[in-house]
């Protein structure tokens, strides 16, 4: 169904939205103009021998971490005069940035998260609400402290823990809730805070994906009683390897520090019950390497600017892509300021898109797009949570049929690259690739 240019003017998106390129399934390579005397040029899919939409290849487009001369020179100076001063300097910078009273750097995020469970000193058998759609790092260590993970569904629009499902899984043993800010999108912490207060639960944040993100202008990490961050090399604040815990209460800080630092109890106030553990600590040796602390301090000074640039560029891309039928990104409330980490997560509703996720991804890949189907292995399916020998109190495993959000996320999610530098031409070509595939969706692949 084609009309002469003199009779109708339309944009590519209007055309794609309303017609799906009809039976012909053709991509409009330009916008119709009433002055045109020739038909608009149409392009075939790359799958069918047409030209690729993405020709601008930039190896540095997703490079991470971004270290420069400042980081190199600082590490070289440290090598010339090895010392531990960068550790305290980083911790002070972290506290100043977040406005928190206590922070302790660790050798990695897992050790920071493990230390927080020791710090809380919850009764044996205490249940902790955790998203099934999350990582093992803070969950497996619960077994060391006789805690019980209770696996909870997520909101498929955000991939974050569902407060509504948390309500269904409460018991007389529930003592804490651990939100994970998945792929840089903060959980709705005001709702979680209200839920926790109502049921007298401790809020423990796994903030390893969301350095510098905010909810209602309050930094992530400041919502929970304790928060743990990873500083691993792929994270928004990369130190190659490292982690940090932040604490609102002095007793939590001292107890967490004593778990992994044999040489620091002497620095606690005279009345601290943990001073006597100087020389032995109560767990392991988990302190951060000073070179990692040095990198983390420098990267922290650049965090806000980089996050802002990422939000602008990725937001611009996603705003255009989500005009296409059936394509959405992680839902972000207006009062939430997200960050980006590793990937740009989107979702395909196959019915609205008019083609299967698999077919869409295959067509996009042929166009040169680094797009993949995304499926996450739910935590409760791992052997570590199924075998009695590892737990004095077994995890509470969900009926898979009670996890519709997790299943919907796995059925619909795709990943796009997170562009870590300014890439206007590449962004434009990604938009063109998606528009081209959507214009052909009637012939790409049926649901």
Image: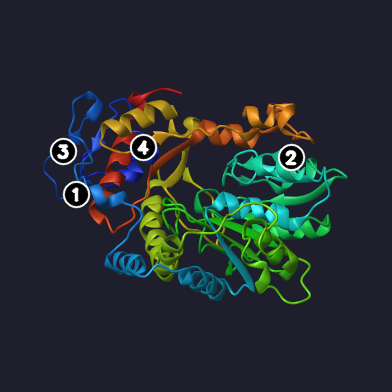
Q: Is residue 224 visible?
A: no
Q: CA distance from mark 1 to mark 2?
A: 62 Å
Q: Is residue 415 left or right of residue 127?
A: left
| Residue where numbered disc 1 is placed | 34
Does residue 303 sit above or below 38 in this rendering?
Answer: below
Residue annotated with mark 2: 150
Residue at (71% x, 48% y) in the render: 163
**Classed neighbour count for the residue bearing mark 1: other residues with Cα under 10 Å, few (<14), some (14–19), many (≥20):** few
Task: Give the Cα separation between the discs numbered 3 and 4.
Answer: 32 Å
| Alpha-carbon span between mark 3 and mark 1 | 11 Å
Residue 192, quarter of picture = bottom right
Of the image marks 4 and 1, the number of the one nearer the N terminus: 1
Q: Is residue 168 visible?
A: yes
Earlier in the chain: of badge 2 and badge 4, it is: 2
The N terminus lies in which quarter of the figure? Answer: top left
Please rate how many residues cluster around mark 4, counting C-alpha atoms within 10 Å: few if below 14, some from 14 to 19, many from 20: many
With respect to residue 93, does 43 lie above or below?
A: above
2 or 4: mark nearer the eye: 2
Q: In the rendered image, which residue does mark 4 sit on?
A: 371
Mark 2 lies on a secondary structure that is strand
Foreground mark, 3 or 1? Answer: 3
Quick one: which residue is furthest to the right in this view? 172
Residue drawn at x 41%, y 62% as measured from the top left? 291
In terms of secondary structure, where does tag 4 sit?
loop
Q: Nearer the viewer, mark 4 or mark 1?
A: 4
Q: Residues within 10 Å of mark 3 (few under 14, many from 20)?
A: few
């Amino acid at each position: 169904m084609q009309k002469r240019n003199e009779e109708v003017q339309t944009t590519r998106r209007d055309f794609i939205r309303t017609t799906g390129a009809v039976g012909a399934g053709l991509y409009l390579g330009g916008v119709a103009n009433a002055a045109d005397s020739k038909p608009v040029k149409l392009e075939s899919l790359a799958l069918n021998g047409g030209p690729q939409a993405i020709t601008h290849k930039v190896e540095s487009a997703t490079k991470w971490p971004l270290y420069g001369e400042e980081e190199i020179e600082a590490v070289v100076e440290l090598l010339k005069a090895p010392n531990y001063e960068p550790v305290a300097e980083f911790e002070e910078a972290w506290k100043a940035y977040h406005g928190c009273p206590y922070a302790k750097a660790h050798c990695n995020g897992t050790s920071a998260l493990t230390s927080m469970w020791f710090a809380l000193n919850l009764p044996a058998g205490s249940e902790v609400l955790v998203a099934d759609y999350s990582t093992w790092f803070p969950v497996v260590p619960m077994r060391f402290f006789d805690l019980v993970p209770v696996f909870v569904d997520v909101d498929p629009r955000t991939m974050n823990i569902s407060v509504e499902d948390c309500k269904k899984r409460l018991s007389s043993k529930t003592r804490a809730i651990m939100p994970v800010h998945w792929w840089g999108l903060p959980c709705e912490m005001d709702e979680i805070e209200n839920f926790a207060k109502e049921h007298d639960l401790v809020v423990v944040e796994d903030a390893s994906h969301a350095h510098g993100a905010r909810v209602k202008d309050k930094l992530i990490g400041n919502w929970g009683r304790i928060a743990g961050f990873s500083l691993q090399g792929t994270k928004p604040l990369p130190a190659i390897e490292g982690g940090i815990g932040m604490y609102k209460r002095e007793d939590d800080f001292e107890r967490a520090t004593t778990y992994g630092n044999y040489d620091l109890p002497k620095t606690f106030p005279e009345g601290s019950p943990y001073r006597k553990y100087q020389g032995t600590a109560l767990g392991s040796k988990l302190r951060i390497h000073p070179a990692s602390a040095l990198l983390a301090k420098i990267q922290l000074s650049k965090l806000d600017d980089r996050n802002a640039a990422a939000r602008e560029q990725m937001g611009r891309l996603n705003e255009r892509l989500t005009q296409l039928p059936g394509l959405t990104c992680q839902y972000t409330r207006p009062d939430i300021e997200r960050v980006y980490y590793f990937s740009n997560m989107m979702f395909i509703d196959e019915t609205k898109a008019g083609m299967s996720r698999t077919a869409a991804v295959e067509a996009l890949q042929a166009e040169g797009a680094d797009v993949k189907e995304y499926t996450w292995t739910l935590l409760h399916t791992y052997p570590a949570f199924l075998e009695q020998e590892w737990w004095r109190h077994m995890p509470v495993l969900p009926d898979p049929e009670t996890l519709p959000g997790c299943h919907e996320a796995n059925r619909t999610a795709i990943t796009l690259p997170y562009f870590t530098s300014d890439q206007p031409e590449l962004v434009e070509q990604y938009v063109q690739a998606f528009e081209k595939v959507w214009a052909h969706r009637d012939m790409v692949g049926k649901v």
